[in-house]
Image (cartoon, helix red, strand yellow):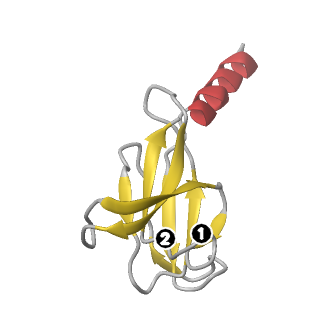
Amino acid sequence: MKFTITLALVATAFAFTRPKANEYKNSDCSSLNYGHNSFFLEDVTMDDTTKSVYLTDGSTLEGIPKGWFGYSDKTSDGGKCSGERLGRLPEKCVNIDTLASERIKCVRSEVL
């Protein structure tokens, strides 16, 4: 009985993963600049000193999968994504200067 309850709790925890977009000062995600993780993350603007971002897709509180998309511009620091949509980003450490055709200045978490 305990095993079944534990297994159910673990399965539930994996179904509800918070989206994460942690910014780093270097290109290999080893020197943290800013951390962001929340079920309510939408747009995360990249600081001008950020060189890479570690992304995990996550889900909504209802368990619906989400994914990250890169944008070429931002309205302001802490603002919204703007400019050209540069495509879907992978779940890993991403060099925001070299992954797309131009620097990724903002990432947006969207329901897939």
Q: Which residue is mark 1?
A: 100
Which residue sits at x=29%, y=59%? 80
Mark 1: secondary structure = loop
Q: Are marks 2 and 1 in contact (CB under 8 Å)?
A: yes
Residue 28: x and y in percent read: 67, 79
Relative to 3, say whether 41 is above or below. Answer: below
Of residues 83 and 109, the one drawn nearer to the viewer in this rendering:
83
Crowding at mark 1 (Cα within 10 Å: few <14, some 14-19, many 20+): some
Crowding at mark 2 (Cα within 10 Å: few <14, some 14-19, many 20+): many
- Disc number at residue 104? 2
Which residue sits at x=43%, y=53%? 108
Of residues 98 and 51, the one drawn nearer to the viewer in this rendering:
98
Tell me the amino acid under the disc marked 1: Ala
From mark 2 to mark 1, how far is it between C-alphas?
7 Å
Res 47 → quadrant? bottom left
Tell me the amino acid under the disc marked 2: Ile
